[in-house]
Image (cartoon, rainbow, N blue to C red):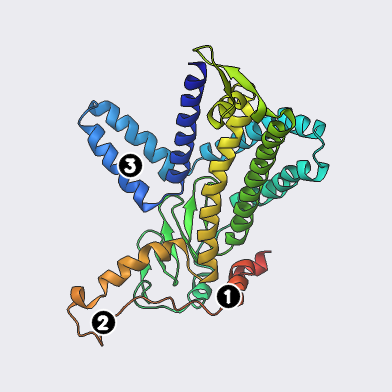
Amino acid sequence: MEFLILFLFYLVFILLCVVVICICFNTHSWKVLILGGAQICACLVPGRLQRAVQGVYNYLLHTRNRIFVVLHLILQVLVYAEYSWEIFGYCYDQGFTVCSLVMPYLLLTVNLGFFFLTCMEDPGTITKANESVLLQAYEFDEVMFWRNAKCPTCDLRKPARSKHCRVCDRCVHRFDHHCIWVNNCIGAWNARYFLIYLSTLTASAATMAIVCAAFLAHLVVVLDLYQETYIDDSGHVQAFDTVFLIQYLFLSFPRIVFLLGFVVVLSFLLAGYLCFMLYLVATNQTTNEWCRGDWACSQHCPLVTRLPPAEAQVYQNIHSHGLWSNLREVFLPVLPCSEKKTQ
């Protein structure tokens, strides 16, 4: 019973972590799910509580705040504290190489450096000073980005591939998305830092998962647990099967198994998101453009516009100029003349 209770809490915690991370990626499907859940709950909770929940939701996800930055750092401190307190010592005693044990710390150092760069770097704020320069940076496709379009909030002409961020209340050049984990927009001038930050975060989680799994596997082999037996409730002698082995490891090393499950789930989520971001970089797209692509196509398809097929406008990515050019555009962005002078 003790194992079942612990395992239930373990599964609930992992599920909550998955939900929180997916929500914070700000995907459209999760927005629909949240709004649907909010509509269902609206019939079950008082109006005052509804307003309170809505206020908290708006503050967390639609207002610039450092809550998720602090949460990000707290999670890293907890994970690395557990790794240093138990796993490092156990693995070192079992003869693991120092290089493999130190690798997560090296990745953490690089990750924190690019994390703070992503947080602090200007993503590409459009101002009166650089408006005219940025208007010439990209070609207008007249489908998703229109020439002479103006931002009603900033009172600025909108360069192609830019977008007004409602959270930061500013127009951002080559806007990708607003990331609450770094409390900043991801745009033309900090996208490279974000990609390296995401890559090192994925690598550190995967490395830690490998070390934890290798330690538990090594423990099973050294102790020869598959050859062990136990007496069940009926008094019969039973050999260790996989379920009992997992239960034994969970009760003997609960924090290590708990950490292993967390970093494994985190590794898969981060790896999937990293692959998606690398795909966007390779094809010279942004998250904003990828999400709006289907909408733009539907708005300009022949059935909607009722134009002849030859005159119908369909969105096409006109900014991709080959893999190396696309990579150079992200990792070696061209700064406006006004920005170069200030630096």
Residue 258 in view (yes/no):
yes
Q: Identify whether 266 is placed above or below 7.
A: below
Comes first in the chain, label 1 or label 3: 3
Residue at 41 percent of width and 38 percent of height: 59
- Residue name at image x 45 percent, y 30 percent: 12
Separation of residues labelled 2 and 3 (CA atoms) = 36 Å
* Residue 90, image x, y percentages: 76, 30
Circle 3: residue type: Ile
Q: Which residue is mark 3?
A: 34
Q: Is residue 113 above or below residue 312?
A: above
Kindly indicate whether the residue at mark 3 contacts the one at mark 2 (C-beta within 8 angstroms).
no
Disc on res. 323: 1
Instruction: Farthest residue to the bottom: give it.
Output: 310
Q: Along the polypeptide, which appears first: circle 1 or circle 2? A: 2
Foreground: 252 or 26?
252
Task: Report the residue that reaches farthest toward the left.
Answer: 306
Q: Residue at x 38, y 72 (%)?
A: 145
- Badge 2 density bin: few <14, some 14–19, many ≥20, Cα 10 Å: some
Could you tell me if the residues under marks 1 and 2 are in contact, i.e. CB atoms within 8 Å? no
Q: Residues within 10 Å of mark 1 (few under 14, many from 20)?
A: few
Q: Nearer the viewer, mark 1 or mark 2?
A: 1
Label 2 or label 3, whichever comes before in sequence order: 3
Amino acid type of the residue that numbered disc 2 sits on in the rendered structure:
Ala
> How far across and how far down the image is residue 219, in percent?
71, 31
Q: Secondary structure at mark 1?
A: helix
In the rendered structure, the answer to whether residue 280 lies left or right of residue 313 reads right
Q: Which residue is mark 2?
A: 312
Q: Quadrant of residue 191?
A: bottom right
Nearest the eye: 187 or 265: 265
| Secondary structure beneath label 3 | helix
- Rendered residue at 38%/40% (across/down): 58
